[in-house]
Amino acid sequence: MSGIRFAPSPTGRFHLGNLRTAWISWRWARALGEPWVLRFEDIDRPRVAPGARELQLADLRRLGLESRAGDERHLQSEREERHWELLLRAWHEGRVYPCSCSRKEVLDDLRTAASAPHGEPPLYGGRCREPSRRPVPTHPTLAWRFRGEDPGGARDFIVARSAARPGSKRELEGPPDRGSFAPAYHWACAIDDHDGGYALLVRAWDLAHAVPHQRAIHEWVCASTGSGNPYPAVFHTSLLTSDSGGRLEKRTRGVTLPELEAAGLSPSEILERFERSFELDAASYSPGKIWGEARETITLGELGFGRC
Ligand SMILES: [Zn+2]
């Protein structure tokens, strides 16, 4: 178990929220004396922006988040073969199955489904668990769902996609197609976190919903491959929002490092604001713990980046 993992998507320049989470992950690495692991999650190819990773790394350096010997950098796309091998293994074990439902079919099933245990709303009606009930695909993409514990399939979530021929059931009968295979976020993330054997993952509170899905995949990888890697601890950072509570987006102005510097803020002044908002308590870490900052969201104004 080693490494503090931060996993940005190279889809554009970092905004302040990304920078703050990166800084917190770096602080954890230095506080615990662990390697700082940056994993660029570049598998969502249409969203990856050329040059974004280099700009993200430049921003981290500019903020003083220097790497040192033992730190790691990875590109998620370089692990596609591993993501594929495990999907095929899961298919052979009957742990994943093809879902050919259209969006409308999923929604129609949910309207008629009884509510799931624990009072949570179901995410899926479970139709494609039974091969005989799988609809003939009406669109060119097939989803592969991971079979969960719930007998109705309410939480069987999507772990990959591959191509299908509308009007044909052929792709429903065999293994996933290698050529068109595209892992979903939870699948790639959970496998890479499993294989990395990290001590701690650092990400914002808006990804807290990912833990049950990724833990389920992690436990399956352990059981299927005989690995003994325990599930890493996860520290959630406050999600930074605009002063009106909206998410920071690419079109949000004034929240990238160059924009802040152009407005007269130095990197050290930015770090001072981060430091005022976050106190690291190294003793709060323990292996496998799921926790985070007390506040799930924080606004730019509260962080000291109020607009003039
Ligand atoms: Zn389905």
Image (cartoon, grey):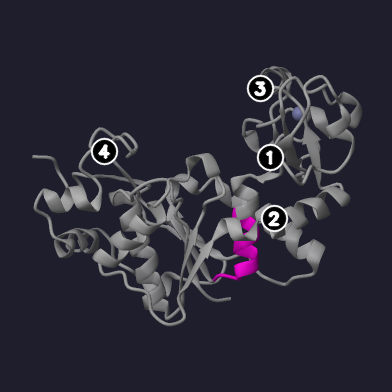
Q: Amino acid at mark 1?
A: Phe
Q: Earlier in the sequence, mark 1 or mark 3?
A: 3
The Cα atoms of the two marked residues, 1 and 4, are separated by 31 Å
Q: Nearer the viewer, residue 296 or 89?
A: 89
Work out how far the residue at label 2 is from the one at label 3, CA to CA, in angstroms.
25 Å
Q: Which residue is mark 3?
A: 103
Q: Secondary structure at mark 4?
A: loop
Q: What SS does tag 1 mark?
A: strand
Residue bearing the label numbered 1: 157
Give whichever of discs 4 and 3 has the lower sequence position. 3
Q: Mark 4 to mark 3: distance in Å?
A: 32 Å
Split into 4 quadrants, where in the image is the C terminus?
Answer: top left
Looking at the rendered structure, the kind of residue marked 2 is: His
* The residue stretch that appears in magenta: 189-198
Q: Identify the residue position indicated by label 2 in the image.
A: 83
Main secondary structure along the magenta-highlighted residues? helix
Q: Earlier in the sequence, mark 1 or mark 4?
A: 1
Please give the name of the residue rendered at 39% of the width and 52% of the height, measured from the top-left corner.
51
83 and 293: which one is in front?
Answer: 83
Which residue is the site of mark 4?
Answer: 242
Instruction: For the residues labelled 1 and 4, say whether their Cβ atoms are less than 8 Å apart.
Output: no
Please identify the quadrant where the N terminus is shown. bottom right
